[in-house]
Image (tube, coloured by chain):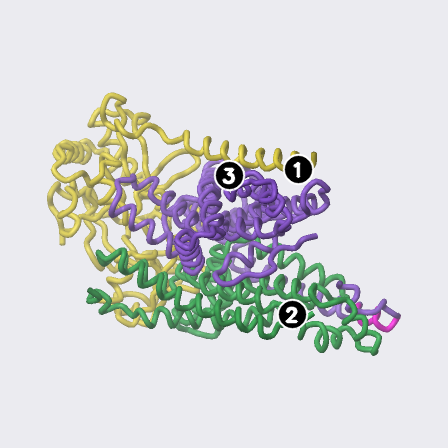
Chain colours: A green, B yellow, C purple
Amino acid sequence: MFDFLEGYDLLGAFWTTVQLTLLSAVGSLIWGTLLAAMRVGPVPLMRGFATAYVNIVRNIPLTVIILFSSLGLYSTLNITMGSEVVKTSNFRLAVLGLMLYTAAFVCEALRSGINTVPVGQAEAARALGLNFTQVLGLVVLPQAFRAAVGPLTNVLIALTKNTTVAAAIGVAEAAYLMKEMVENEAQLVLISAIIAVGFCCLTLPTGLFLGWVAKKVAVKR
Amino acid sequence: MKLRKVTAASAAVLALSLAATACGSDDKKDDSGSSGGSKKITIGIKFDQPGIGQKTPQGYTGFDVDVATYVAGKLGYSEDQIEWKESKSADRETMLKRGDVDFIAASYSITPEREQLVDFAGPYLLAHQDVLIRADDNSIKAPADLNSKKLCSVTGSTSAQNVKDKLAPKAQLQEYPTYSACLTGLQNAAIDALTTDDSILAGYAAQSQFKGKFKLAGLKMTNENYGIGVKKGSDLKDKINKALEEMVSDGSWQKVVDSNFGPANYKNEPAPKIGDIKS
Amino acid sequence: MSSVLYDAQGPHAKRRNVLYTAVFTVAAVAVLWWVFSTLADKDQLAWEKWKPFLGGTEAYTAYIWPGLENTLKAAALSMIIALPLGAVLGIARLSDHAWVRVPASVVVEFFRAIPVLVLMIFGMAWYSEYTDISSDSRPLYAVVTGLVLYNASVLAEIVRAGILSLPRGQSEAAMAIGLRKNQTMRLVLLPQAVTAMLPAIVSQLVVIVKDTALGGAVMTFPELLASANTMSAYYGANTIASFTVVAVIFVAINFSLTSFAGWLERRLRQGKKSTGAVLGVDAVAELAAPGEHEEVTKVG
């Protein structure tokens, strides 16, 4: 029944999906946190930049962003992401595109986390003489992150599903393999079921586990 | 009161979206009686291959379009009775089988696999797989020179795979949704060569924006016999063959070749004999 | 909140802010300058490449508008089909009967767990193999199928959250005057929940509009993004210009939808007649993924 799987690197494709997810997750967490810090910070220009960034990036289809990172950054600006191998370049460009897109959502999740921290906390921190970086880094963000675990989980799951868009620039991840298999084999339902189960295995446990973590770390108020 | 306003607003949104769908769907003409009483003929062509079949704001242009127009004329249809449809490479056999189009002239190479599924009239042009390179690039003279080069083609096309499997196993493949995306990369030296049929490549090289920037390497890696695809067992095949023969003998073929490939400086092969398929 | 994070600025802090602003500006200008000069080097800023968009309407009538029409058509169709489907699924998940609730939950969780693109690829292959839909409209069917399956599940969660956001007194009062469960839902809860959900539904429309682009890039659906391809083939591979124009159009559409949703939300929160329950714009992002969701509603 599963004979047709021979010759296709199913595990490899899903491994690519996982790699895409993890690398862009780390990247977007860092860039998203910076954006959130800019957005609530005291410098008007940075606030404006972060707000504009979030509003623009959130409203562009991810497909456009991914294609742009290949056509614009690679083909036009000759940014090869430090690799002469086309496949590696494409993979890294996909990570970059996913990261830039997801960071906007991370920023929003963190901002909603920051909003859950009671005003008194920041006021008390300021009363102690802490400056903005200290208030944010030592008092507000640690609590905001705990409150944001839930929303961030959703961002992570959405990211896992979004990695399929990398198929548009030829990164051989799960959806790319699925398209290839569907075109060459007469096992549509079976192939789709395998891919769907694969994604369920990635997303559902993530959701359950991090949902549990979210409850565990939530700040009781 | 406020609630009512909101409901009214949402109703307006819904009405707008409904209207959008309504105007979207009314451009679908009745395509059931394609060659019957309404006296229309539906022809499948490419929409994004300048020189072969390209949708322009003024209509459709290209070699395939001109050949198809001539053939349709011989079949008794004037130019305004032709309905053009885009036939993507992967869809061509299905479109013919289901009768979505009457015939297809869309850089459609005759191959034994395809002949199992559809019938071909022609061939009407002999093209070769080739690569397009930057005009100042002299490093590619034989297919083996493509090793370690970056080769671009459209997603799912057989031409790039063909090079990689048989001619230059070390070539790197970049796949994009369209040839124009490849061209951007080629122009900016992110990609070294774009591969597909020389007739298609010539069309791109001839665009005014690219004058003098690209050239064909002239590798002639395969023979591509362009045919006009019709439904299996259709009586159109013989009529089209006759029309194509007339087209060559009365000089219109050469005229169409000159007007479409002339600017590209494309040295085309002489008109092939009907049924003479070069492998 | 933002002003709570830092003190009113004294002369020292003001000077520092000026410095930060200067550094940031210099960095931003340097990046922009590099991008623009490289683009100019590569001939991408040539008037020839931008002329079709800035110097005439031809490109819009021949390529962009037909593409945009398809984008809007697919988005509107998906929304119209997904809404009732989502409402049924959402209400089914609230049912007292396990045989209704459990299958509905499985469906909703399943379709939220897998990527829309996978659903679209499946739809495309399914329609070509098992139906005789013409190849013209097959991509539209596939795109709409994928979008409907996914968004119906998300909308089901929105509906469920909308109903749960209503104060419990509403259903208690309905029961007290002797309404049956079905009447309570139909006459009391749903009408109020629909109002509460409106902002969330509008922002879900943004997600749908964005996802139609998948159909253009990976399948052969002739929507806005795909029209950029045909267009750049004609205008001499002005890929950068075409993509920029398409991106700007997407941002314009989605930004106005987002703003409209925000306006609706503010409007509803101020409303005196409603129960005050509003399912905000933020709720959408949270309901889009599988798993438990708590307190997505803000009663304000």
Residue A16 place in picture, x, y as percent? 39, 70
Residue on which disc 1 sits? B3
Verify CB contact (< 8 Å) between mark 2 and mark 1.
no
Which amino acid type is marked by label 2?
Leu
Residue occupied by mark 2: A34
- Residue C259 visible somewhere in the drawing: yes
- Residue C113 versus residue B27 in the image, above or below: below
Q: Are marks 2 and 3 in contact (CB under 8 Å)?
A: no
Question: A41 left or right of A193?
Answer: right
3D distance between C-alphas at marks 2 and 3: 39 Å
Give the quadrant of the N terminus of chain C.
bottom right
Question: Label 1 amino acid?
Answer: Leu
Foreground pick, A16 / C202: C202
Q: Which mark is residue C60?
A: 3
Residue shown at 53%/32% (left/top)?
B15
Q: Which segment is the magenta one?
A: C11-17
Whether B121 is drawn above or below B160: the answer is: above
